Image (cartoon, rainbow, N blue to C red):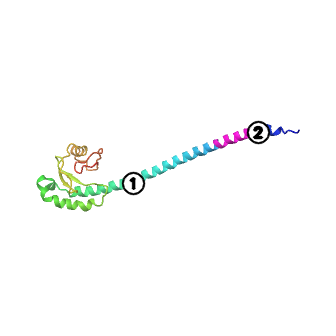
Amino acid sequence: MNINLTAGRRTPLYLSLLGVTLVFLFTLLGYFLRASYHQAIQAAEVTTRNLVQALEARLQGNLARVDAALGLLAHEATPAMMQKSAVAARHQNLTAHMAPIMSNFPDVTGVYYFDTEGDLIYSSDPEARATHVSDRPFFRHFRDNPGDTGLAFSDALVARTTGRWS
């Protein structure tokens, strides 16, 4: 009887080669998954930077346009029209004058004129509620810094004129 013993000796060798091959394949798979993960992170960072730059450019453009429109409205506001006695006579005309200007700014909810005590006297929004803002940070800023005619920002708050966050 002739028995082939070499087949039994090859089995551990094949199993060893199979094991080494599987370890190599899993290592290679891990490497490619890690490389793919890092590429996805880099692509997300680039996309985020691009979106931030686009939003920044849009916001700067909007703020520049709003600042120009507010500058025009401020230039047109005379001390006489800011007197409480003049409000009733001028309110309708000024609201009508502001409406087409504000229609060019969909991101702006309205323009509001407050007197030196903080009472609302004119608004581009005919639905705006009469309100008092002397306790608000933006009002205090301009009251305490009369020479400052630029934009000022405060924390988000619920607008008393509209009841919405602004």
Along the viewing direction, whichever of 105 and 115 lies nearer the viewer: 105
**Residue 153 percent coordinates (x, y):** 29, 46
- Magenta residue check for 11: yes
**Residue 74 percent coordinates (x, y):** 23, 55
For the N terminus, the image quarter is top right
**Residue 106 percent coordinates (x, y):** 31, 58
**Residue highlighted by disc 1:** 57
Comparing marks 1 and 2, which lies closer to the viewer?
2
Which residue is painted at 67% across and 41% down in the image?
22
Which residue is painted at 28% across and 61% down in the image?
103
Q: Residue furthest front?
A: 1
**Residue 157 percent coordinates (x, y):** 27, 45
Considering only order in the chain, which callout, 2 or 1, is on the residue closer to the N terminus? 2
Residue span colored magenta: 10-26
Tag of residue 11: 2
- 54 horizontally vs 138: left or right: right
Tag of residue 106: none
- 56 horizontally vs 123: left or right: right
